[in-house]
Each structure stands twice: as C-alpha cells, then as structure tokens.
Image (spheres, helix red, strand yellow):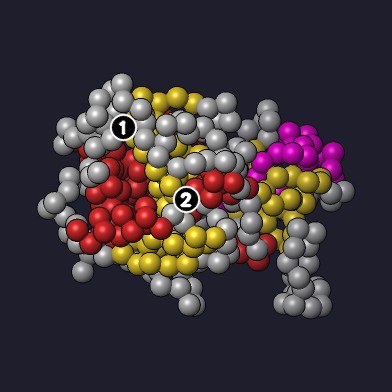
Amino acid sequence: MSRKHNPSLPTIDIPYMIDFLTRLLSTPSPTGFSSQAIALVEKELAAFPEVRTERTLKGSLLAFFPGEDGSDAPTTRGLTAHVDTLGGMVREIKASGRLELTSVGGFAWGSVEGENCLIHTRENGTVRGSLLPHKASVHVYDNVRDDKRDAAAMEVRLDAKVASASEARQLGIEVGDFVSFDPRVEVVNGFVKSRHLDDKAAVANLLCAIKALHDHNLKPRASTCFLFSNFEEVGIGGSSDFPASLEELVAVDMAAIGDGQASDEFHASICVKDGGGPYHHELSNKLRDLAAAYDIPVKVDIYVHYSSDGKAYWRAGGHAAVALIGPGVDSSHHYERTHTDALVDTTNWILAYLLNN
C-alpha cells in the first residue's frame, strides 16, 4: 500500500513532486554543464517569495528560508542535494567521424552501452547520437560478447551523414563538448524509472518540502539554507558556499541498494557511514528519533563505495555536524528506479527536521 498523508506534517503535493522531478530529469546536466538545471530550480523557487536565492561563483544555487527565529537570525541549518549528473565530454574526433569520450563522474561504460545521447556544441546547438562499442556487431567481429567496455572501446555514432573528422567538425562538434545521456523517464505503478535519479530525486524532495511549508504558511524552526550543488559527481559540490554560521548540514542523496544493503526502493534511508567514514553520530540519531516520532519508516545503512556533498564539506574544512539521508534508488549510476513511497517518506523526514529543534 502506498504511503498516505502524514497528519502530523504539512500535506505534500505529490503530483507537483513527480511533475517537477520529470522536468528536472529531462533537463541535461552532466557535471560542468548544469546551468539549465540550476535555472529550472531557480525558477521554481521564485514561486515562494519567502525564499531568497543567489547564484554562487561556482554556478550552484543557494536558497535561504528565514525561520521562526527571525529574518536577521544567523543561518544555522543547511540541506543540500545536487543537480549534476553523470555524463561525458568529447575527447577525440576520430578519422571515421565518430567520437571518443572521457567520462564525467564514476560509472561503468557498460551501463551506458546502447544509450542515445546529445552532444552539446558551443555554437550549433545539439547533435544526436548513440554510444556503442567500436566493435558492436556480432556478425562482423569475434569476441564481441567478451570485449572490455572502456573509454577506448566505446564511441558515439552520430545521427548525421559524416565519414570523417572534418565532417563532424562541420556540425560544430569539438573536443571538450559535453555529452548527456538520455534519461528515459517513465512513471509507472508508483515507480519512477530514469537515469540520474541520483540526485535529482532529492532535489525534488527539497523543492516539495519548501512548497509544503509555503502552502501551509509555515516557517522552518531555524533559519535554513538549501544548496543545490553542481559538482557533486566529481567530489567537490558541497565543498564551499555554506555560511560560516552553519551548525548542522543534512545532505539528501540517493540510498544505494544491492546485496548486503538494508535500503530498498520503498523507504528513505539514513547512511551512518560511507567510503569516507562515519557521519555525525548525534545528528544522525536526532534524525532517526524524528523519523520515529513522526512514524516515518526508515532504513539504516552503510555505503562502502560512496561519498556525498556532506563529506565534501567536511574535507574542505567545514565544521558543522553532517548527516546523510535519501530515498532508496535501485541500480545506482545505471538505469535507476525508485518508488513514490520513498520520495514521500524522504520529503516528510525533511519536513520533520525543518519544523523541529
């Protein structure tokens, strides 16, 4: 049974959350090329006059929501989620007119084999293509099934009549152009299937929580900032931009699912330790206590091959307590899937945190 409204918390606009998430997922934003996604979030936040936004020099977006402690109170709480995703950049234009890529973010090349993509040129808009092994046809090549999938073995086949590097360049393509992979968004039976739910699902959680406060004329208990970061997938998204007055930071990012993991697609999770070590014990316990108080079913987990903007903040010298929560996402950094239940629970958890000491 899908989650029902939690009567102890403001009502969540679930159709809005799914609509916004679908639009955000459909907006290309590989790390380093995320300005359109940031602009979309900025436009959504403009509907909430109590929230003030500002762009950082790095291109991320900060949103400030004054709390019950007053508009002049220092910002002591922060939440963060990232709009940037996995992707690629053109490394070489081959003599054949096909493209070799370099990866942006950490993924297995086999996870994007056969995917359609967009090459974002500097001046000529986008060019369609597909990412395939150079030796793709079993009718021509030996060992196609066993050949290694890596950057050197993969190439983009352009959807244009090109047979040379010069013809590809005539389309406006150059080394350094960004490449985004088609997300293939589907919403079916409560599931959301798409690439890049990491971490656009959590961005939708934050927007939906802000909207719920706005719709019910409520304020956070303490003045709060929200960072929508744009370099998380390369490890530096949350490394700066937070106010010095920050005392607590909750990173909201997807929960990893697989053998040996506690997380699943139907719940929110809290990560107490990732590849960079434990999170702040007291803040994590505070969040677990809030979940219990509001009857939000959550999972507790450890992600051994994982990091977050919260850890980037600590590595850069941040002093605030840091915790990590988020919706369960299956097949992370592949073709991902989550469920509305996990999205609702995560949003409710964020609201419980915002509305309490």
Mark identifier at residue 223: 1
Q: Is residue 160 above or below residue 243?
A: below
Q: Considering depth in this image, is 44 or 189 the residue closer to the camera?
A: 44
Q: Are marks 2 and 1 in contact (CB under 8 Å)?
A: no
Question: Which residues, given as a range, are shown in magenta?
Answer: 158-185
Q: Quadrant of residue 337?
A: bottom left
Residue 180 sits inside the magenta stretch: yes
**Residue at the image point whose x is 19% and y is 58% from the top:** 293
Q: What's the mark number on residue 128? A: none
| Residue at 43% over, 47% down | 321
Q: Could you tell me the amino acid type at mark 2? A: Asp
| Residue at the far left in the pictured view | 7
Say which quarter of the image contains residue 246: top left
From the top left corner, tell me how far across and down residue 87 is, in percent: 62, 49
The residue nearer to you, when weighing 106 against 241, is: 241
Q: Which amino acid type corresponds to the residue marked 1 in the rendered image?
A: Ser
